[in-house]
Image (spheres, grey):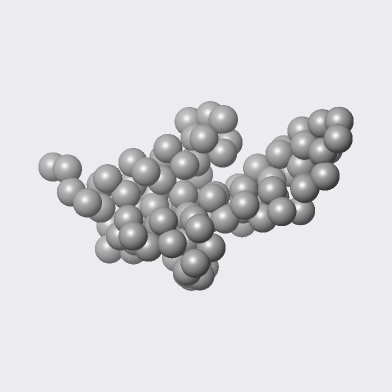
Amino acid sequence: TITPKSDIFSLGVIILEAVTGHRDYPDVTRTPSDEFIELTIRKWRNVLQRTPGYWSLRIDCQQIKRCLQVGLICVNPERTKRPPVVKVIRMLRGLESIDYSILE
């Protein structure tokens, strides 16, 4: 059955795939989210630092981190902890804070 909460899960998968470049995302129950986020940011940082004329590393890494956090919240195995789409958009835009307890 497709529900708004399953749509949010799918959105989370798409966000994570777009940022990481692959289909693997951590199972929130087995892989610590902070480790996944730091590893992904480290990979991005390595690529971006090698780009000639690149200057917005800090800002871009913050945006990457925000996308990863929101994506991970969306793929939470507990449906009730997945946010509505309006909240996802507000979190991605930086207009609403991210509930980090969901990632723990």
Q: Going 25% across and 53% down the picture, which residue do you hit?
A: 5
Q: Is residue 52 above or below residue 62?
A: above
Left or right: residue 35 compared with residue 2: right
Residue 49 lies, in percent from the top left, at 83, 38
Examine the rendering and report whether any part of residue 15 can be seen. Answer: yes
Residue 28 lies, in percent from the top left, at 46, 52
Q: Going 70% across and 50% down the picture, which residue do you hit?
A: 61
The residue nearer to you, when weighing 100 against 14, is 14
Q: Going 82% across and 38% down the picture, which residue do you hit?
A: 54
Q: Quadrant of the N terminus?
A: top left
Examine the rendering and report whether any part of residue 50 can be seen. Answer: no
Q: Is residue 96 above or below residue 1?
A: below
The residue nearer to you, when weighing 73 against 54, is 54
State which quadrant residue 39 falls in: top right
Residue 62 lies, in percent from the top left, at 67, 55
Left or right: residue 43 compared with residue 29: right
Residue 32 lies, in percent from the top left, at 56, 54
Left or right: residue 99 compared with residue 59: left
Left or right: residue 80 compared with residue 49: left
